Image (cartoon, grey):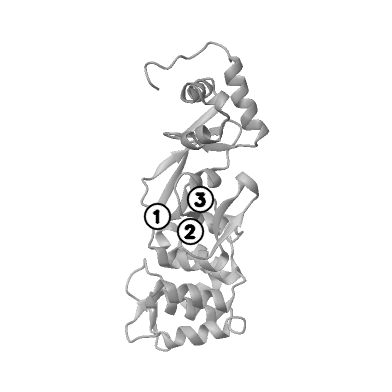
Amino acid sequence: MAKSTYISEHLTEKQIALLKYLDDYEILYFKLSDLVSRLPKSQIHNVNELVENLYQKGLLNRIERGVYAKSTYNNIHALATFFNKNSTIAYWSALHLHGLTERFPNTVFVKTTNRKRNTEILGVPVKFVTVKENKQLGIIKEGYGDDAFNLTDVEMTIVDCFDQPRYAGDFEDLISAFAQARLTNRRLIEYTKAYQNTALTKRLGYLAELFHTEALHSFIQYAQKQVNNKYNLIDAGGIEEGQFVSRWKIRLNVSEEKILEMAQNPY
């Protein structure tokens, strides 16, 4: 807060007028710079001071410098994707929103093409994972109006989580999610092709053959064509041990029996 900002003891007419404007236009959150450009000329004077007063009185929350939300608004997903362009709720957060895990992530995971420092929004940790443009696809809208936010679709969520398992809970969660998910051949092929990650494609191909042989027949055929001569662990974060599966050039450092067991116990 600037030293010159005057904080009134009570709500003034101008502060009440600004609150009414936010209500009338159903503005749940805003950037200060955008608000100035939207307000009628009669209300532009001292907008910074008005907003600071409403923040000090607990009627607005400061999300970050220059970004505010009404004190009654707490959709972290919408706020986290609002103030950083090209941002999408992804990884473990998306798994939970799609109903593929009941384990609630204490951190909100956001995939973005714009580098952004991790932060907290209303006391909730937000992790920004920076990716290249080719990995920012498979995006759907969740919610309506200003309450909407970008979310990775089911297939993209699965691909992302196997690509970056450290942001996806644990291996058992991923196996359970893959076994439950209703997946399409076209999207899995499109997304794995965009990622250009052979190990990822082989892992998903092996699991598709294990859990969705008929439904994902086309993807399995595609994935088979990507198999190279290098063996990769089925659990990328595990140790080098276990059975070798020559068809997929996958090493089962988690046994197939255990993987099937994981799928039978979704939570």
- In the foreground, 129 or 83: 83
Cα separation, mark 3 vs mark 2, equals: 10 Å
Residue sitting farthest toward the front: 41
Circle 1 sits on which residue? 129
User: Residue at point 40% right, 55% down?
Assistant: 129
User: Residue at point 41% right, 74% down?
Assistant: 200
Cα separation, mark 3 vs mark 1, equals: 15 Å
Question: In the rendering, at what x and y percent does residue 153 appear?
Answer: 56, 63
Circle 2 sits on which residue? 91
Quick one: SS at disc 1? strand
The mark lying in front, picked from 3 and 1, is 1
133 is higher (above) or lower (below) than 62: below
- In the foreground, 61 or 213: 61
Residue sitting farthest toward the right: 24
Is there CB contact under 8 Å for labels 3 and 2? no
Crowd band around label 3 with a 10 angstrom C-alpha radius: few (<14), some (14–19), many (20+): some
- In the foreground, 22 or 244: 22
Crowd band around label 1 with a 10 angstrom C-alpha radius: few (<14), some (14–19), many (20+): many
Crowd band around label 2 with a 10 angstrom C-alpha radius: few (<14), some (14–19), many (20+): many
Question: In the rendering, at what x and y percent does residue 166 appear?
Answer: 40, 59
Cα separation, mark 1 vs mark 2, equals: 10 Å
- In the foreground, 101 or 259: 101
220 is higher (above) or lower (below) than 97: below
Circle 3 sits on which residue? 105
User: Residue at point 58% right, 38% down?
Assistant: 74
Disc with the residue nearer the chain's start (1 vs 2): 2
Disc with the residue nearer the chain's start (3 vs 1): 3
